[in-house]
Image: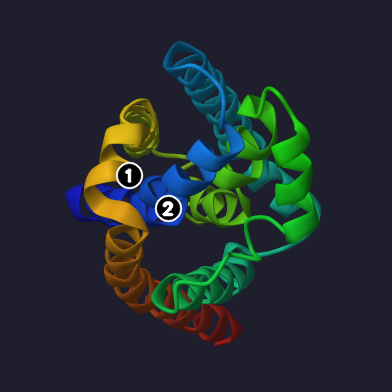
Amino acid sequence: MIEQLLTFFVVFLVVVEPVSVIPIFIALTEGASEAERRRMARKGVLIAAGILVLFSLVGGPFLRLMSISINSFRIFGGVLLFLIALEMVFARTSGTRTSSPEEEEGRKRTDISVFPLAFPFIAGPGAMATILLSFGPAAGNPLLYGGLMLCVAIVLLITLAILYLASPIMRIMGVTGANVLNRLFGVVLGALSVQFVIDGLRGSFASLG
């Protein structure tokens, strides 16, 4: 179980990509005071937490209602995470998290905490897929479920801390430093996403046998 929790923590942290949010967060909150930035960061993380908790509770039952097996979603989730990993490795703007029109709309908003900060930057499709892949099989194990929830809480607290310190971190790292770190995380995520696909295929073929 410890290995499961550790794997989930690493994958979820990499998918949320709190470091990559820093340049966008600073750009979208240009002109706002530090206190206002931190208020938006708190609100955004809280809303993202609500979205992710809701998805962890209803995601599994929804899949069962739609007659979609967890192995099928594991394969799709692995492919989705692999696409995110490719974008991270090549330091491209992630189309799997938000589009250019959405970013442009975010720049026009005074308060970005709900959109695009909470969704899709923090609680984006990749984060939701990761939640569903891990929380679905843990439905009958309260201890594992609680451990996964704790991992989500820790990642969101890390995200909040990074957003709180966005300005000094950006001054130290710069855009190049953030891209280098994201590339390293992208390689790790790519390997883990391939493993998700392999596990999904293995489970699908085993069920056919």
User: Residue 141: x, y in percent?
Assistant: 39, 38
Left or right of 95 in this view: 33: left
Front-lying residue, 34 or 135? 34
Q: Residue at x 43, y 82 (%)?
A: 198
Query: Which residue is outermost to the front?
Result: 31
Left or right of 19 in this view: 47: right
Figure quadrant of residue 31: top right
Q: Residue at x 56, y 76 (%)?
A: 79
Name the residue that disc number 1 marks: 170
> Do the numbered discs 1 and 2 sit on residues whose CB atoms are within 8 Å?
no
User: Residue 99: x, y in percent?
Assistant: 73, 59
Please report whichever mark, 1 or 2, sits nearer to the chain's N-terminal start: 2
* Numbered circle sitting on residue 107: none
Q: Is mark 1 on a helix, strand or loop?
A: helix
Q: Residue at x 50, y 82 (%)?
A: 206
Front-lying residue, 146 or 176? 176
Front-lying residue, 164 or 83? 164
Q: What residue type is labelled 2?
A: Ser
Name the residue that disc number 2 marks: 20
Q: Residue at x 52, y 69 (%)?
A: 84
Q: Which amino acid does label 1 sit on?
A: Met
Left or right of 33 in this view: 158: left
